Amino acid sequence: MTEYKIALLGFGGVNRALTQLIADKNEHWANEFGFKLKIVGVSDLYFGSIINKNGLDAHELAAVPAVKGGFRTLPAGSAEPANETVIRFSGADLIAEATFTNPVDGEPATTFCRWALEKGISVVTTNKGPVALHAESLKALARSTGAQFEFEGSVMSGTPVIRLAKESLAGSEISGFKGILNGTSNFVLSSMEEGLDFSDAVAKAQELGYAEADPTADVEGHDVRLKVVILANELLGAKLTPSDILCKGISGITSTDIAEATKANARWKLIGSAEKMSNGSITASVSPQLLPQGDALAGVSGATNAITFTTNVLGPVTVVGAGAGRFETAFALLSDIVSIHKNKTKIGK
Amino acid sequence: MTEYKIALLGFGGVNRALTQLIADKNEHWANEFGFKLKIVGVSDLYFGSIINKNGLDAHELAAVPAVKGGFRTLPAGSAEPANETVIRFSGADLIAEATFTNPVDGEPATTFCRWALEKGISVVTTNKGPVALHAESLKALARSTGAQFEFEGSVMSGTPVIRLAKESLAGSEISGFKGILNGTSNFVLSSMEEGLDFSDAVAKAQELGYAEADPTADVEGHDVRLKVVILANELLGAKLTPSDILCKGISGITSTDIAEATKANARWKLIGSAEKMSNGSITASVSPQLLPQGDALAGVSGATNAITFTTNVLGPVTVVGAGAGRFETAFALLSDIVSIHKNKTKIGK
């Protein structure tokens, strides 16, 4: 039985949900996958940090009170974060990185990833920043130290969109994709179809916890743009940065636009897409598009996400699923760990 | 570079498309996957048979005229089928089985699979019969001889539904599924929504080549029932046979039913489903169901297929794609071969 010593960076919803899953399902995973996870360290700006090379009790961690410095309530816990110590000195052979997304330079998460990968410690992350901005160099670093860098959860939460494309669709020759990659904006558009105007729809999304106090990143398409960069670079071999992508959000969509679309049996959707052109170049964009009812993405309502891959051999393939959620996103981290385990088994480590 | 010697059983649309793919893409696959395919034998009731242990020319094979005994036009070809000889004496280490589906006892395809697996020859098949009726014994036989038995194409053509569930969703705890698993009946229902009555819609499907002269298996749900057996047994650990499944087709759906559904903002769909109950038993059925517009399957029109998996950790995940087509189904065979190659590499063969 393999046991991975895992350290958690960030202890918000996602890593806390992963901790709960470990508490509940570690024995089950041992049977299903042939490995167990032992948490050896956690660091978080708000909760503080805690390290135990012999393993922390996942039940106890998951139950830590959500107060500033909460880890202080545990034996050997501290109210201060200690990212570097947790990465470098907790004895972890796996890091689950789920700190906040910084869309400008991907920091400090990118540095956390680098510290780990430099030491040969594999990283699984749900954080769009390091992946969209630095995937190529982080993957190269991982290769050079024999570590692995996996990021399934950075695009569609636990819905396995990267792995579907790279593994299950291998050989189908993916030539492009278009997706509904932001649940908040899709929820706003669906609410507008039910009669709300844009600002009331945003307020409703905020009320329900789908939108943040500042909804700009969601409704102006910036979040989708990072996801398009990740997918285009990973699946189509592009070398895009966010500034390469024309980005238009949904704040210009009016109730009149929505009503006219409904009359025409069509729906406005915020679409992130990329396509490989015949000369090999990649074009990518984020913009509201009017989809006819027959489009596989037209029926995707509310906070759900979806993506259609265009393939040469197989035609279009669409996957629809959760695009957010604590446990859903924590599942992405698990699926990355399963993938790392399979690769390690394969190369006989 | 690994080279697999492959023999083809059945040379209808699917294996002929696979032959065309091999002709066009073998060099490309060598780069992408690290293997090449060499066709060493083909047997077909209509075309006859041909064997060459040193490899047949895929371009030449794909261009064989579609006439009875057509293989006689090739050097060393015969107008007679020779399934046993091709399986046992062509030197193949891989069999692509794509003969006709016999829903009663799965023969003769099941015997073909057995002959191959007994010799340690791996089998990839798109044929529902052997899988729905004998998967358990064929998988056990494969394990006992170190061969592999893969059948991604038996359910949704090339759309990777089995592999998505077993690999990408591993750990998500699939508790059930419901799907639109027959393109012909879905096309008929879509045509009825456009105003045709049932028999005109069937006639239109026949005209377009979607339905066979005898449409019973498609419209009465028998085809879907086999697919539900395959998925329930493979993904939920059921031990169902087709007779365990309540099966009702769409021939009782009237134009009035369709019109009333449209008025209620809903759509009739032929749904195959299975669910794991809390006591561990599996219930499964095939029947027309009225889906509200918000259901991820409601928007799937025409000959397209789709399936929604219910998972404990990740909520519902839906995949939509081709459910038929020569090249689409041939892609399923390729994806099975890729999977076999990965496993062989893994266990160091």
Image: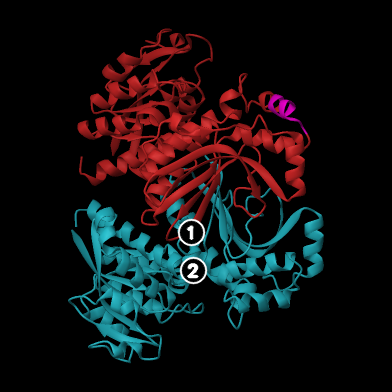
Chain colours: A red, B cyan
In this picture, residue B31 sits left or right of residue B164? left
Q: Residues within 10 Å of mark 2 (few under 14, many from 20)?
A: some
Residue appearing at x 64%, y 32% in the figure: A250
Amino acid at pointer 1: Gly
| Residue type, numbered disc 2 | Gly
Q: What element carries label 2?
A: loop
Chain of the residue on which disc 2 is drawn: B
Q: Mark 1 lies on which chain?
A: A
Residue B87: horizontal and vertical position, in percent? 28, 78
The answer to whether residue B29 is seen in the rendering is yes
Q: Quadrant of residue B289?
A: bottom right
Q: Name the residue under label 1.
A: A315
Out of A243 and A115, give the one closest to the viewer: A243
- At 57% from the left and 35% from the top, the residue drawn is A182
Depth check, front residue: B217 or B15: B15
Residue A254's spot in the image, x, y percent?
A: 73, 33
Measured Cα–Cα span from mark 1 to mark 2: 10 Å
Residue pictured at 72% horizontal, 25% vertical: A199
- In the rendered view, does B290 fall on the left or right side of B123? right
Q: Which of A156 and B32 is in front in this view?
A: B32
Q: What stretch is highlighted in magenta?
A: A196-203
| Above or below, A244 relative to B86 | above
Tell me if residue A28 is in the magenta stretch: no
Q: Name the residue under label 2.
A: B325
**Quarter of the image with the N terminus of chain B in it:** bottom left
Q: Where is residue B336 in the image (x, y as percent from the top left)?
A: 36, 61
Pointers 1 and 2 in contact (CB under 8 A)?
Answer: yes
